[in-house]
Each structure stands twice: as C-alpha cells, then as structure tokens.
Amino acid sequence: MSLIAWPLLLMVSGLILLIAEVFLPSGGVVGILALSCLVLSLWRAFERSTELGLIFLLAELILLPIFIALAFYLWPKTWLAKKVFLKLPSEEEIGESRSGPRLDHLVGQFGRALTPLRPSGMVDLDGRRLDGLAEVGLIPSGTLVQVVRVRSGQLIVRVAPEPTLEKILT
C-alpha cells in the first residue's frame, strides 16, 4: 500500500461518518466514530512523516467546516427532517383574519359596559353586544364608555365623560 492510503481512507471515512451523524439519530455514537477516524487519520499521517501529518491536519481543518456545513445544508431535505420540522404557513394563514364584521366605523362612538371590563367584557353599542377591552384599568358594568380603536376584532374602550346637554344636541 502507498504511504498515504490508510490516513486517507480514515479521513474519508471520518468525513462520511460526520455527515451520517447529522442524518442518523444515533445519540452521538456515529459522531464519536467520525472523530475517532479523523484523529486516527492524523495519527497515521504523523506516523509516516511530520510533513504528511501537517498536510493532513491542514486538510482536515479546511474540510471539517465544509462537510459540517454541507451536512446541515442537506439535513432539511431528508425524510427524517420533514417529519420533525413544522411546515411553513401558507399565505392565507399569514394574512390577517377577517372572519368577523368590520368594526372600524365604531371608533369614537359611545356605549355602555354590559359586564365589568376586567380588562375585557361585553359592551353595548346601539343595541349591539360586542366584545370590549378596557384601555386602562377596570371598568364597572353600566359605565359609559367610548371606543378608542379596534384591535384583532375587539373594541378598545375607555371610560367616557358623562355627556352634557350640549354634546347630546350636537
């Protein structure tokens, strides 16, 4: 056999086992075998000559990161990874849900808290029972509230000042 046959065979085996470690759920056994092959490769190369050992050391220092990156690049494409990883959401799942009625037109309107808002509860706006969320603190039932904004199909309300006769007439 040639001078570099065993060190080269051990290095190639170690690199192949290193990639196999990413794909096979072995609990680290294949990884230990890979590192053992790589160390034995260096040992056998240094045993032949120091110059050959340094060449193999340089080759392993260059090839190890490349093979590790290649293994992790290929990993998501394997059958095991497809079973382990979650699927990406579709465009329809990412978009905002518009299942309920639009409530933007209610911003600025007044209503009454039907239940205590601690911080959420029911609000009555012109005879419609809607889900409301107190902007700040707790709001007792029967309190006059004003819609500040709409977020995720829920009205954000705050305690409104009692209406005066001027506000009612205008």
Image: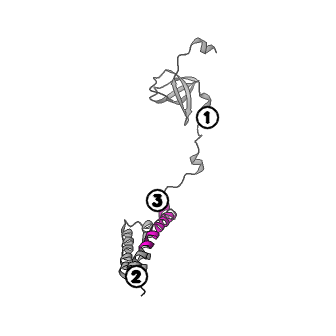
Percent coordinates x, y for residue 94 in the rendering: 57, 47
Q: Quadrant of the C terminus?
A: top right
What residue is rendered at 44% in x and 72% in y?
58
Query: Which residue corresponds to mark 3?
Result: 84
Percent coordinates x, y for residue 100 in the rendering: 58, 37
Chief secondary structure of the magenta span? helix
| Vertical comparison of 6 with 130: above or below | below
Identify the mark at residue 102; answer none if there is no mark: 1
Percent coordinates x, y for residue 86 in the rendering: 49, 55
The answer to whether the residue labelled 1 contacts the one labelled 3, judged by CB atoms less than 8 Å apart, is: no
Q: Earlier in the sequence, mark 3 or mark 2?
A: 2
Give the amino acid type for the residue marked by disc 2 in the picture.
Answer: Trp
Residue 60 falls inside the magenta stretch? yes
Q: Nearer the viewer, residue 16 or 150?
A: 16
Give the amino acid type for the residue marked by disc 3 in the picture.
Answer: Val
Q: Quadrant of the N terminus?
A: bottom left
Q: CA distance from mark 1 to mark 2?
A: 74 Å
